[in-house]
Amino acid sequence: MNHRFGTLAIVSAIALLSGCTRIETGEVGLRINFDKTTDPVERLPGSFNQTLIGSILTFKIQDVAVGVDNLTPLASDNSTVKDFDMTVVYNVNPSAVSELWTTKNRTFHGLSEHGDDILLMQNYVALTARNAAYKVARGYESLKMSDNRPLIEQQIRENIIKTLAEEKLADKITVSQVQVRAILPADVIVNSANELVRAQNELKTKEVEVQTAKKEAERIAALNANAGAIGYMNAMANLKIAEGVASGKVQTIVVPYDFKGIVNAK
């Protein structure tokens, strides 16, 4: 008899556990009653909740990542950015799960990759981030956005937080990070920039060529200006030799092999 009761207890425990859902870390659960109403009390991580009667919805609330891709904002130079991609990471206040789920439009929420968790306010945060990106991008030239990426990320986050505050959601949703993953200017802007760089390089090359030509001209002019002086110095040297010979002070003269003058040897 005791053995039978023991077996029955084990079977009952197994059945009970199989009809339970455990709330994992980073999640919050809500019970949906058999009459389809939502129990307002949040089920916290670590709790076991029976699902034999009714069901449990689980919501991921920590570090929810929202990808906002393929944006084409307008830059301050009136060019359209070819591609702008970013990721927004946010957290949901556990005590606000029931309110957000029951009072907000269901289109505001998303699903996890495998569909096992509801991502509260994911679509709403994505829309808010999109609007913030378009607003912030308008303050930068297309080619300067990449250099100002950290500042753009900060300003987008500030704009999202401002919108949440205006919608009275600041105490329910916390945006922890905005990461701009890609910024691609329009092709026409890139091509124009490349042409400008090429023209500037050609101009610098020509300036160097002009300076080189000027220096060469100065060198030739200097040589031409010194040609008469060299001749004068040679004539004076020859005069000194002639005077030395005439006075008998010079006995020996070294004559170059190509000497074409006349030497009177006595």
Image (cartoon, rainbow, N blue to C red):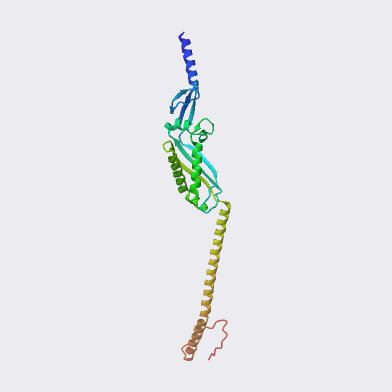
- Which one is nearer the viewer's eye here, 117 or 209? 117
Location of residue 168 (image quadrant): top left
Residue at 45 percent of width and 31 percent of height: 99
Q: Horizontal and vertical percent for residue 34? A: 50, 22
Residue 220, given in percent of the width and then of the height, sits at 54, 75
Count of numbered circles on the image: 0
Direction from residue 260 to residue 20 in the image, left or right: left
In the picture shown, does residue 183 fall above or below 23?
below
> Does 27 sit left or right of 196 as displayed?
left
In this view of the protein, can residue 102 be seen by the observer? Answer: yes
Residue at the spot x=52%, y=74% of the render? 218
Residue 89 location in percent, x, y? 47, 39
Above-or-below relation of 194 to 134: below
Closest to the observer, 266 or 207: 207
Question: Closer to the camera, 115 or 236?
Answer: 115
Task: Give the residue displayed 46% in from the left and 12% down from the top.
Answer: 6
Seen from the viewer's position, the closer of residues 132 and 208 is: 132
Q: Residue furthest top?
A: 1
Q: Is residue 111 visible?
A: no
Against 240, residue 101 (above or below) is above
Q: Residue at x 46, y 38 (%)?
A: 90
Provide residue 131's location: percent of width, then percent of height.
50, 44
